[in-house]
Amino acid sequence: MQLIKYLITVLVISSSSCFAQNIHCEISGTWKHADKNAWLEVDLITKTVNVKSHLDNPKANGLTVIKNLEPKWSGEMYNGSTGGYVSVKLDFNGCEQLKVTDNGVNILTLNRE
C-alpha cells in the first residue's frame, strides 16, 4: 500500500513538471517596457524587436532593438553605448513577462501589453 502511494505521488509530480514545460507562450505582439514609457513590437516575420512607441524619446520610434531573433528566443540586442550588438537570450516569466538577459544578467524586462 505504501508503495502504491509513493508511485501515485511520483506520477502526479512528474505529470505536473511535464505540463509546466509544455506551456506555450506567444512572444509576438506588443510588449511594454517595465521601466519606461515605451512599447516594443516583437515581429517573428522580420525576426526583430522594434520600438513601436517611446513617449519619452520619440526619436527612438522604429529603432530595431533586437535583430536575428531565433526560435529558442535568442538574438542580438543593440547596445547604445558601443553602437554595436550583443548576444541576448529572451526568457518568459509566465506568459505575461519577458526578460532579456546577457550572460544571465537581466538587462530588460517587458510586460505583455
Image (cartoon, rainbow, N blue to C red):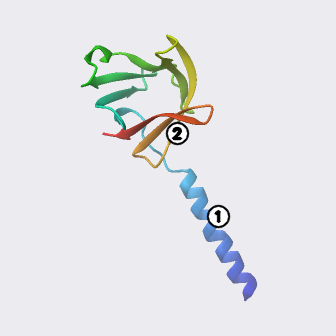
Disc 2 residue crowd, few under 14, some 14–19, many 20+, Cα 10 Å: some
Query: Residue 64, how many percent across, how many down?
Result: 41, 17
Going by the numbered disc 2, the residue's amino acid type is Asp
Q: Nearer the viewer, residue 50 or 29?
A: 50
Q: Are marks 1 and 2 in contact (CB under 8 Å)?
A: no
Q: Quadrant of residue 48?
A: top left
Q: Quadrant of the C terminus?
A: top left
Query: Residue 22, how many percent across, how many down?
Result: 54, 50
Give the residue furthest to the top.
Answer: 83
The image shows residue 15, relative to residue 27, as above or below, that is: below
Element carrying mark 2: strand
Disc 1 residue crowd, few under 14, some 14–19, many 20+, Cα 10 Å: few
Give the residue furthest to the right.
Answer: 3
Going by the numbered disc 1, the residue's amino acid type is Ser
Query: Residue 47, how many percent across, how many down?
Result: 46, 22
- Residue under label 1: 14
Distance from Cα at disc 1 to Cα at disc 2: 23 Å
What number is the disc on residue 55?
Answer: none
Which residue is rendered at x = 26% and y = 18% of the image?
58
Element carrying mark 1: helix
Give the residue furthest to the bottom.
Answer: 1
Q: Nearer the viewer, residue 36 or 1?
A: 36
Query: Residue 42, how many percent across, how many down?
Result: 39, 28
Q: Is residue 81 left or right of residue 16?
A: left
Which residue is rendered at x = 55% and y = 57% of the image?
19
What number is the disc on residue 91?
Answer: 2
